[in-house]
Amino acid sequence: MTKRDLIDEIVRLHPTFSRRDAEVVVNSVFESMTEALCGGDRIEIRGFGSFVVKQRKAREGRNPKTGEIVAVAAKRVPFFKVGKELRLRVDGGEDGEGHSAGGENGNAEVETAPRAAAYPART
Amino acid sequence: MTKADLVERIYDRVGFSKKEAAEVVESIFEIIKVRLEAREKVKISGFGNFVINEKRPRKGRNPQTGDEIVISGRRVLTFKPSQVLKRTINTPS
């Protein structure tokens, strides 16, 4: 799905909006989010996830081709953490392969422990 | 910034009622969620891509007790920020 498909879907769901209106809203949403992140603000969309900006220190890197040492400048990188509702919805498919509710190891006891280990609490 | 703040900004920028703005913002995230649930990649140009990855089961350890456990296979969502977003965030305004 691309941004254009998203706009089409909005028009279909909200017939009172023109395509132009839907375009403006969708663009405004992502522009507003970008602005918030630029200002160092954290975005939290309940049921979806949160976006934060992390600071990366300057470091010495290497050109993997030549092995040369290059200076990598300090930078800010956007980071997304999926929210609980969406995390569960994404993982909750119906084919047993590759999701935690099914498979050979899918007994209830095993399930809670690995989840806790895979998503350690962060401070 | 929360969803309510986002609605407020949209409402300020566009000539819709607050109720309309709230409904559309809600729809946007719901549509994205439905597509991701169907394992579809969602690409927002200028912002980034939301991608579903399949993880195979692997061995791990409980960091508290050191017990070896099997981390079950799962499907996870990752966000790949676009070059534009990365650049914008690093441009002093």
Image (cartoon, coloured by chain):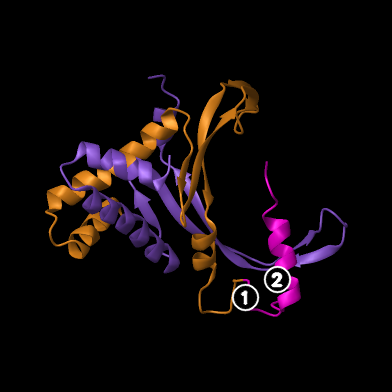
Where's residue B59, x and y in %?
77, 63
Identify which residue, B73 or A109, lies in the foreground: A109
The image shows residue B73, relative to residue B63, as above or below, that is below
Kind of residue indicated by mark 1: Ala
Label 2 residue SS: helix
Q: Residue at x 33, y 37 (%)?
A: A32
* Residue B84 in view of the camera: no
Label disc, if present, on residue A101 of the rendered structure = 1
Q: Quadrant of residue B84?
A: top left
Where's residue A123, x and y in %?
68, 41
Q: Is residue A108 magenta?
A: yes
Pinpoint the chain carrying mark 2: A
First along the sequence among labels 1 and 2: 1
Kind of residue indicated by mark 2: Glu
From the rendered image, report the letter of the chain displayed in purple.
Answer: B
**Where is mark 2, residue-wise?**
A111
Q: Residue at x 48, y 29 (%)?
A: A40
Q: Residue at x 49, y 61 (%)?
A: A86
Alpha-carbon distance for marks 1 and 2? 8 Å
Q: Residue at x 30, y 58 (%)?
A: B27
Label disc, if present, on residue B84 of the rendered structure = none
Label 1 residue SS: loop
Q: Is residue B50 magenta?
A: no
Q: Is residue B20 left or right of residue A116?
A: left
- Give the residues drawn in magenta, as a range: A100-123
Where's residue A72, x and y in %?
58, 23
Tell me, yes or no, whether the two marked residues, 1 and 2, touch with CB atoms within 8 Å: yes
The image shows residue B1, relative to residue B17, as above or below, that is above
Identify which residue, A48 or A70, lies in the foreground: A48
